[in-house]
Image: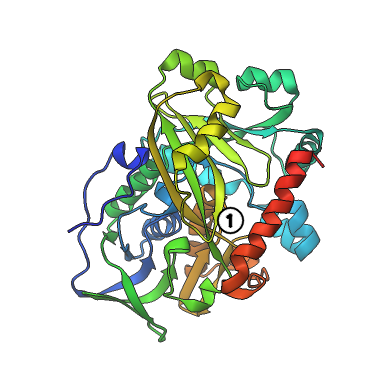
Amino acid sequence: MHTPHTPSYYADTRNDKRDRPSLTDNIRADVCIIGAGYTGISSALHLAEAGFKVVVLEAARMGFGASGRNGGQLVNSYSRDVDVIEKNYGGETSRALSSMIFEGGDIIRERIATYNIDCDYKPGGIFAAFNKRQIHELEEQAERWRKLGHDGLTLMDSNEIRDQIQTDVYCGGMLDMRGGHIHPLNLLLGEAAAIESLGGTIYEDSKVIRVDRTDTPVVHTEQGSVTANYVLLAGNAYMGGLIPELAAKSMPCGTQIITTEPLGEDVARSLIPNQHCVEDCNYKLDYFRITGDNRLLYGGGVTYGGGDPASIEKFLRKHVETTFPQLKGVRFDYTWGGDFLLTMSRLPQFGRLTNSIYYAQGYSGHGVTTTHLAGRLIAEAIKGSAERFDAFASLRHFPFPGGQLLRVPYTAVGALYYGLRDKLGI
């Protein structure tokens, strides 16, 4: 019996509906990857292109976690921008990470073009501001990014942003033409097909129950095993307790999404005329875009510790109708939630448990692009050039205050402060 995808718009409109087999043998590989989300699939594709024999083990379906449930937005940088990285980690680390902040999105566009992946890619992403403080922060961000060679940015006042988004709730914003949006599950499945075309193997319904941390590690599932030269832990928020020391410095967080009924091209274009995706500048932000079949896809909110509110529709309807009053009473055809993995620093956690066991996780809401960068860096490290991977691996990471018992209430209090700050515009 195959584990089904979580019901969602993406699951119902995926291009590849094939099931992959479960692992039932004891096999060997150059690299065994645990988790068939973006981190695992991106890494596997880079490695397969380099000639490595790659095996990917997925506990459920490819893209079952955040990679197949997210908002589908290509957002540049990390969850902390380069100014915060320089302040907390110094100039050398900031320069190293700054040189890579646009690379993840570029990799996605390369993959789409190289492998002819049908995933509804549209260029352009808007950061939408509610107040003068947020406008000022966008101006500073634009200055930083332009110094790094990004010339595709346009700052907008209240009239200009209304030309882009038919709502009165924003006072300005920034358009990033190196951003954009995609059908995230179809992107992942297209990349998976590319791996298989290069000789890689993906097993579904193959939950890993143990990893032997020997010189040549062995990954055990309930019905088989993989002995490999290298192992990558890429389960993110869905890793569970497999590796306790990784779980101690991260926290699953839930976010929720709705998709409306088809609106028709005229209505869809009236909402977002140029089909760019949007995210606002609040600490607990909302994000939305028009899908390939002219629905509004709208997400927002954070549930610390993971999980969903009692009614996703009730929770998000007020957000949708505040942003677009003209959609009052519109039917929601799909509602779903999913977990991403948050770190204290809001920066991803890369590293090694042993010389042959790598991990990458904790993208803190910026996973679509950063996971694709991670895949390239992991492949570089395994091929023997680890400088860029180690720039991330050198970042200090700390447990949440209060440990796993109190991390949720402590984080929620912090979010309450920043939410109040956003409402007051200070």
The residue type indicated by label 1 comes to: Ser
Q: Is residue 308 visible?
A: yes
Q: Which of these two is toward me, 311 or 172?
A: 311
Query: Is 336 left, or right, of 374 in this rendering?
Result: left
Residue 53 vs 230, above or below: the answer is above
Q: Quadrant of the N terminus?
A: bottom left
Give the percent coordinates (x, y) of residue 142. Answer: 75, 38
Scheme of image coloration: rainbow
Q: Residue at x 36, y 69 (%)?
A: 32
Give the percent coordinates (x, y) of residue 288. Answer: 53, 34
Query: Is 350 left, or right, of 132 in this rendering?
Result: left
Query: Is 108 left, or right, of 144 in this rendering?
Result: left
Name the quadrant containing residue 415.
Answer: bottom right
Query: Which residue is labeled 1 in the image?
Result: 364
Give the percent coordinates (x, y) of residue 258. Answer: 44, 37
The residue sitting at the bottom extreme is 214
Q: Residue at x 35, y 71 (%)?
A: 30
Q: Secondary structure at mark 1?
A: loop
Q: Quadrant of the C terminus?
A: top right
Name the quadrant containing residue 202.
Answer: bottom left
Q: Which of these two is toward me, 382 or 153?
A: 153
Q: Is residue 346 visible?
A: no
Q: Mark 1: few, some, or many residues within 10 Å (few <14, many ≥20)?
A: many
Give the percent coordinates (x, y) of residue 123. Answer: 53, 30
Q: Which of these two is toward me, 266 or 424?
A: 424
